[in-house]
Image (spheres, rainbow, N blue to C red):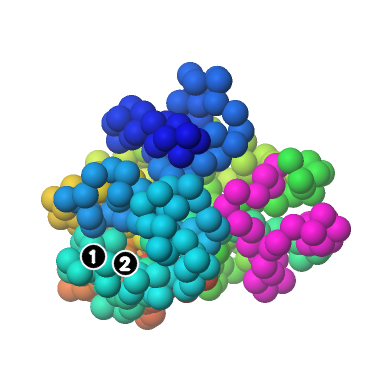
Amino acid sequence: MKVEHQIRTFESILKAYKHDMPLHRFLPNYYKQHKKMGSSDRRWASRYVYSYFRLGTSFQSLDHVEKLGIADFLCNETDSLIVAKVLPELTAQQSLSKIEKVNLIKAKYPDFELSQLFPLSGYLSPGIDQQEFQLSHLTQPDVFIASTEKNSSEIEEIFIDLGIHYRRIGKTTLAFPNSTKLEMLIPKNIAYRIQDLSSQTTADFMDPKPFEYWWDCCAASGGKSLLLHQKEPKIQLLVSDNRESMINNLNSRFAEFGIKKYQAKVLDLLLNNDQILHNYVFDGIVLDIPCTGSGTWGRTPEMLTSFEERKIEQFNQLQKSISGNVVKYLKIGKPLIYITCSVFKKENEDIIQYLVENFPLKLEQMQTIKGYTEKADSMFVARLIKQ
């Protein structure tokens, strides 16, 4: 039977996956090693594996097949063979809302609690709606692109002509289902960048002025620097990261967008960099700091079961060290923009409290960006002014 074949494939993938790389990288490698799998087999396998991990720590006493049936029912609106096998009485309810389906499952499995979908709910920032946030993990977030107003309109026309679903958000942002093959549909001569909606929203906390000197100190591939440059093309930039590979990626990305006037350095912000930065002082610092990434686990649901609780405290200490090391390079009266893609209070509000209490910084504004209401990542951003 076809469903038995799907189950064997699912179990084979589950056994092979060791949580040593993101699932979105592991699956393509697995499919390359199993070339007899057709496109339909790969599509169903990916759906099943992602759905399974979205259940977090729930249903641990059940076997993999029963848990998979529950997962596929909760996470998808279209029928599947596994739901028909495990939950035949619920196949007609597949298109109900998430909360309606959760209630049906809870009626059948009384020990199930919504909090099991996100096992570290006790650490959440106070601004998070726990039920809505937990439910969001049953849905794959959208992919968001940012572009100029002109290019965004051109891209929109392409998808209208193709009859492909999308959402417009503002003048320069479009959202698509995660499976959309953007690189195959958008011509190479139309410039755009993939950047989560919440990440784009952090730009509201930045106000660069012409010729000001800003430091994007944990720049990675330069997403926040692109936001700065978009708001003020005449800005002067220093970008740094502790990984040379990231700086190389950033250089390529900047070249793609025609950004030439900037400096790039490989810096470890846990060290004393005074010898390198002794004559630097900045009009603004963007600190998109290393974190648990817990606000992005809707995209990487394997983290719901592989993340170790002790790492929250480790990141808290790391963030205190890095934050303290960059403040001295900020001009008086100028902003430090603190950003995480975490939903944990220890990485967000607690760090802001530490900075205000231990450094000449005054909190001007902070916000939990609730991406779970927009099928996006959730983030935290704060703007502090040096006194």
Q: Residue 171 appears at what percent x and percent y?
A: 72, 71
Instruction: Give the residue type that dot 1 points to.
Output: Tyr
Residue 285 lies left or right of residue 319; in this view the side is right
Q: Counting other residues with Cα less than 10 Å from the Cα at mark 2, is it few (<14), some (14-19), or many (20 or more)?
A: some
Indicate the amino acid at tag 2.
Ile
Residue 174's x, y, as percent?
Answer: 67, 63
The residue wearing badge 2 is 105
Is residue 177 covered in magenta?
Answer: yes
Do the residues under discs 1 and 2 have CB atoms within 8 angstroms? yes
Front-lying residue, 328 or 170: 170
84 w.r.t. 165: above or below: above
In the image: residue 349, left or right of residue 258: left
| Residue 271 part of the magenta segment | no
Q: Is 6 displayed left or right of 251 in the figure?
A: left
Residue sitting at x 62%, y 41%: 253
Q: In the image, what residue occupies the spot 78% across and 41% down?
A: 188
Which residue is more in the foreground, 238 or 104?
104
Measured in 3D between alpha carbons, the distance from the residue under mark 1 to the one under mark 2, in whole angstroms, is 6 Å
Residue found 58% across the figure and 46% down from its top: 262
* SS at mark 1 in the image: loop
Quadrant where the C terminus is found in the figure? bottom left
Residue 326 position in % (x across, y down): 32, 55
132 or 172: nearer the eye?
132
* Residue 41, visible in the rendered structure: yes
Magenta segment: 154-183
Tag 2 secondary structure: helix
Residue 109's label in the rendered image is 1
Residue 51, given in percent of the width and then of the height, sits at 41, 51
Name above or below for residue 257 compared with residue 159: above
